Image (cartoon, rainbow, N blue to C red):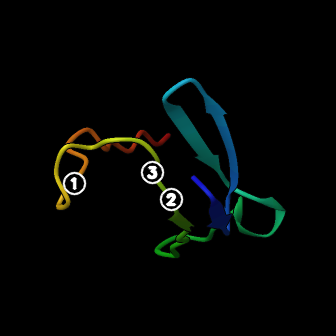
Amino acid sequence: MTQAWNATVTQSGAQVTARNVGYNGSLVTNASASFGFNGSFSGTAGRSDFVSNSFSINYS
């Protein structure tokens, strides 16, 4: 991950965690929050159309 917005991002090995920042951590009923990120890859993927199939979101 090279850049993120509307989140505080940490990484441990291959796992990346995005958490709320101060201004979007408390929401009223039916409100929403979003975040975004950019990433990059270096090395050999083997294919030019590589897409991750192991992206998951855990929330509480």
x and y percent of residue 1 in the render? 57, 52
Query: Can you tell which of label 1 and label 3 is closer to the viewer?
Result: 3
User: In the rendered image, which residue does mark 1 sit on?
Assistant: 51
Q: Classify mark 1: helix, strand or loop.
A: loop
What is the CA distance from the residue labelled 2 to the residue labelled 3?
Answer: 7 Å
- Look at 52% across and 76% down and name the residue there: 31
| Amino acid beneath label 1 | Val
57 or 32, which lies in front? 57
Q: Are marks 1 and 3 in contact (CB under 8 Å)?
A: no
Q: Classify mark 2: helix, strand or loop.
A: loop
| Amino acid beneath label 3 | Phe
Q: Are marks 2 and 1 in contact (CB under 8 Å)?
A: no
What is the CA distance from the residue labelled 1 to the residue labelled 3?
Answer: 11 Å
Q: Which mark is residue 26?
A: none
User: In the rendered image, which residue does mark 3 sit on?
Assistant: 41
In the rendered image of this protein, does residue 32 appear above or below residue 57? below
Q: Are marks 2 and 3 in contact (CB under 8 Å)?
A: yes
Earlier-in-chain disc, 2 versus 1: 2
x and y percent of residue 5 in the render? 66, 69
- Look at 71% across and 67% down and name the residue there: 24
User: In the rendered image, which residue does mark 2 sit on?
Assistant: 39
7 or 51, which lies in front? 51
Direction from residue 43 to residue 55 in the image, left or right = left
x and y percent of residue 34 in the render? 53, 71
In the rendered image of this protein, does residue 45 appear above or below residue 30? above
Residue at the far bottom in the pictured view: 31
Local packing at callout 3 (Cα closer than 10 Å; few below 14, some 14-19, many 20+) is few
Q: Quadrant of residue 43?
A: top left
Query: Can you tell which of label 2 and label 3 is closer to the viewer?
Result: 3
In the rendered image of this protein, does residue 14 appear above or below residue 20? above
